[in-house]
């Protein structure tokens, strides 16, 4: 139901209540706002992500038209396939070429169900994040055995371990010196860092076949390292191999999607959290299409 529909119902019933009043009262109880079709019917690239809309484990799914950088819909019900499919229903399957998601199985299944002819692209930020998480897990495992005194361990926790997560090209000369010392303390740490930096170079490759060959080699060598945390990453990359390498067919990411999720968070903070989901949806979509 939308504003014109409410207006027509009121006209037929001869009620003297302003349409705007009814619309405002119902917005907390029904998903009133419908995105105009011309904003989504020709969308080629779509982003999908989850967001939290209330305290606890209340999650929803947001779908983004990556062509025009607009939120297409937000749906409550959890970060599951059903909610994802509902958020994608607004798009025309015939026009969609690719969906960008994180490595979440329900999102993959939803995209395959709604857009059988489109390809799925895994967001590169989440791919690199998985590798950084593996480094953090390795650090937790080896931390007690590092040959450092208490003050040095505190400095490592506060400063040095973050150098390992940063891209080498972004480090200052002094930071590179500190990093070299830290990496010399443990062979596994040095090895996983080298694998991480090597993997980053994949995004400088221009064609899909070269990228696939690189990824296969990286997965094989990571497993051969016998580092448990790195082997887990390699297994995950292997499971999602096709969808990771689809990035070199369509160079899309969920950077815009993440920005829109942050926008939803801003709406929540400004209102000290909406009383219910439909009110949040109403205000977010109105701001997208009417700049209110």
Image: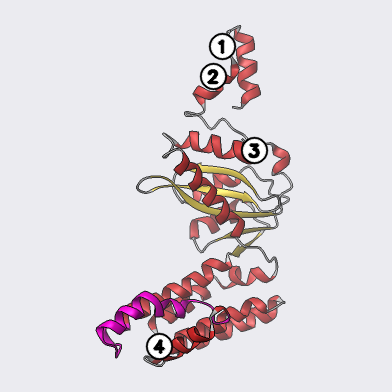
Tell me the quadrant of the picture where the C terminus can be found: top right
Q: Kindly identify which residue carries mark 4.
A: 182
Q: Which residues are magenta?
A: 142-169
Q: CA distance from mark 1 to mark 2?
A: 7 Å
Q: CA distance from mark 2 to mark 4?
A: 64 Å
Q: Residue at x 72, y 77 (%)?
A: 207
> Of discs 1 and 4, which sits in the foreground?
4
**Residue 226 visible in the current orientation:** no
Q: Kindly identify which residue carries mark 3.
A: 291
Residue 94, image x and y in percent? 72, 50
**Residue 250 visible in the current orientation:** yes
Q: Secondary structure at mark 2?
A: helix
Q: Kindly identify which residue carries mark 1.
A: 17
Q: Kindly identify which residue carries mark 2.
A: 22
Q: Earlier in the sequence, mark 4 or mark 3?
A: 4
> Of discs 1 and 3, which sits in the foreground?
3
Q: CA distance from mark 4 to mark 3?
A: 50 Å
Q: CA distance from mark 1 to mark 4?
A: 71 Å
Q: Earlier in the sequence, mark 1 or mark 2?
A: 1
Do the CB atoms of the residues marked 2 and 3 lie less than 8 Å apart?
A: no
What is the number of the mark on residue 67? none
Residue 106, image x and y in percent? 49, 56
Q: Secondary structure at mark 1?
A: loop
Q: Earlier in the sequence, mark 1 or mark 4?
A: 1
- 154 falls in the magenta region: yes
Do the CB atoms of the residues marked 1 and 2 lie less than 8 Å apart?
A: yes
């Amino acid at each position: 139901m939308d504003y014109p529909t409410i207006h027509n119902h009121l006209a037929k019933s001869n009620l003297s209540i302003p349409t705007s009043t009814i619309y405002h009262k119902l917005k907390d109880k029904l998903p009133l706002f419908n995105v105009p079709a011309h904003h989504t019917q020709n969308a080629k690239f779509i982003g999908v992500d989850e967001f939290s809309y209330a305290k606890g484990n209340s999650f929803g799914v947001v779908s983004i038209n990556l062509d025009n950088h607009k939120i297409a819909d937000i749906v409550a019900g959890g970060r599951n396939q059903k909610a994802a499919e509902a958020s994608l229903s607004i798009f025309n399957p015939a026009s969609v070429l690719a969906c960008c998601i994180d490595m979440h199985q329900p999102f993959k299944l939803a995209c395959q169900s709604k857009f059988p002819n489109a390809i799925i692209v895994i967001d590169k930020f989440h791919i690199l994040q998985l590798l950084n998480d593996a480094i953090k897990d390795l650090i937790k495992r080896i931390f007690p055995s590092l040959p450092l005194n208490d003050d040095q361990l505190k400095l490592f926790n506060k400063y040095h371990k973050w150098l390992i997560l940063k891209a080498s090209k972004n480090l200052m000369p002094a930071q590179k010196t500190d990093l070299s010392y830290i990496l010399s303390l443990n062979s596994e740490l040095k090895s996983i860092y080298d694998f991480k930096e090597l993997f980053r170079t994949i995004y400088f490759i221009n064609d899909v076949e070269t990228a696939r060959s690189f990824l296969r080699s990286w997965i094989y060598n990571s497993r051969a390292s016998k580092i448990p945390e790195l082997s887990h990453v390699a297994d995950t990359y292997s499971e999602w191999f096709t969808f990771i390498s689809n990035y070199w067919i369509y160079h899309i990411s969920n950077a815009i999607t993440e920005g829109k999720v942050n926008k939803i968070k801003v709406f929540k903070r400004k209102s000290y959290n909406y009383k219910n989901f439909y009110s949040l949806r109403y205000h977010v979509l109105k701001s997208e299409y009417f700049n209110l």
